[in-house]
Image: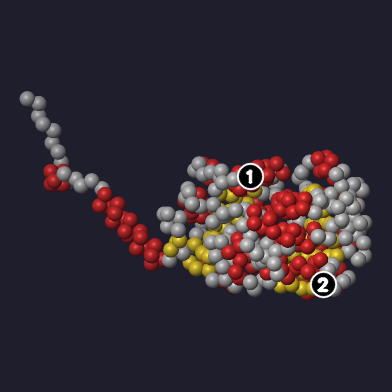
Amino acid sequence: MEIPKLYQDYFKENKFESLTKIQESVYLPFKEGKGLVAMAPTGSGKTLAFAMPMLETLVPGDGLQVLILEPSQELAIQVRTVIQPLAKLVGCSVQSVTGGANPQRQLKKLKEKPEILVATLGRLKELTEMRKVKLGNIQTVIVDEADEMLNESKLESVRETIDQMPADVQMTFFSATGNEIFKEMHKWFGQDFLMIDQRDDSSYTAGIKHYFINAATDNTKDALIRELAHNKKFKGIVFFNNSRSLHKIISDLHYNKTNFVALDSKMSSQQRKSALQLFSSKKVNLMLTTDVAARGMDIDDITTVINYMVPRDNSEYVHRGGRTGRMGKAGNVLTFGNSHDFRNLQDFTDVEVKKVFLNRDGTFSDKETYRKEKRHAQKTQSKSKPKKRLRDQKNKGKRRTPKSDK
């Protein structure tokens, strides 16, 4: 399938040469109004996959027609930013409503009557209860990061939101990983869905290498992170399983004058926005975060993703790793832990993970190569030391007696 004429200039400007497989697979079924569950690897262009056909179904000036649900405010803002220039091509507008942001400012934007709304569940619920957002004319709902949005804590909220829409609303769900609920979507949403599964397409993750470093203590992990952070070629995200572990390392990095930013769900919207801007603009090359940044975030040129501790499951590992090596580019996923953690990682992930050591130049090598380079460095260092004078060597260990006064 060729790039639709409407978007050809956009693709050229962004140096996209062709449609990805998920974009090709979704385009016609979406335009035909079918219910979809579409899965594809991270970095394969899922946002454009639903944005392109969705925009071609809109009627400019006819009020709110499409709702896109996102799991985090960062992802909602990112999706809005991607869609905005494309929406202008069809004479439509897009707005976002997210928790943490100024509600009055969002309400003011809603008065412009956008055709597309990108929202997080909490803020959307507030606005619908206030009757500031009405979902009665929604034609299409897109649930992004659907494996996360349909977990136990969010499923009922998603269903309650969709229940406020017309009975024939088109429902579409997009994800990088699967969810058991995908097998019984009819039970939960009362309609049949076309399943599109492109997860086996490894071309988008082919440039990612997976490594494991034996680092059992926090001190060892922190030292490795500091060493990487001082490498000018490094731009990485360190993921923590919880906020407590994240904040534990912050004081150590500050003490050692390491330049970094932190991103956590407990931070204000403005703090999170500022941290992302500093990291995205390359003013800071290290970002520490919980899984608030694991899903969907598209930041250019991330060389390395570090798991400070082994992720809880394969889904978490896949989404974190998807922040690097996007669209087939090179990238590294590095996990810290002990031998038990390594076995655990191998049990749940289906990629090859190699045990490596971190070299001084920021590269990784196997045990034998690392030892050779270390011995070579020690020899070079010893040769560079100034030799002691012969007289000093002869007198080594001898007691010197002071000269008597004459």
Q: Secondary structure at mark 2?
A: loop
Q: Quadrant of the C terminus?
A: top left
Among all residues in the image, which is located at the extreme front?
A: 5
Judge the density around disc 1: few (<14), some (14-19), many (≥20) Cα neighbours within 10 Å.
Answer: some
Q: With 383 as the anchor, is 280 left or right in this view?
A: right
Give the alpha-carbon distance from disc 2 to disc 1, as whole Å.
Answer: 38 Å
Mark 2 touches mark 1? (CB < 8 Å)? no
For mark 2, what is the residue? 193
Q: Residue at x 73, y 61 (%)?
A: 5
Displayed quadrant of residue 358: bottom left
Q: Which mark is residue 277?
A: 1
Q: Amino acid at mark 1?
A: Gln
Residue 254, position as x, y percentages in the image: 54, 42
Residue 48, position as x, y percentages in the image: 72, 60
Among all residues in the image, which is located at the extreme left?
A: 406
Q: Amino acid at mark 2?
A: Phe
Q: Quadrant of the N terminus?
A: bottom right
Q: With 313 as the anchor, is 37 left or right in this view?
A: right
Of the pair 231 and 406, the residue shown nearer to us = 231
Q: With 200 as the anchor, is 396 left or right in this view?
A: left
> Does residue 265 lie above or below 167 as drawn?
above
Answer with mark 2 or mark 1, whichever residue precedes in sequence.
2
Of the pair 347 and 96, the residue shown nearer to us = 96
Q: Secondary structure at mark 1?
A: helix
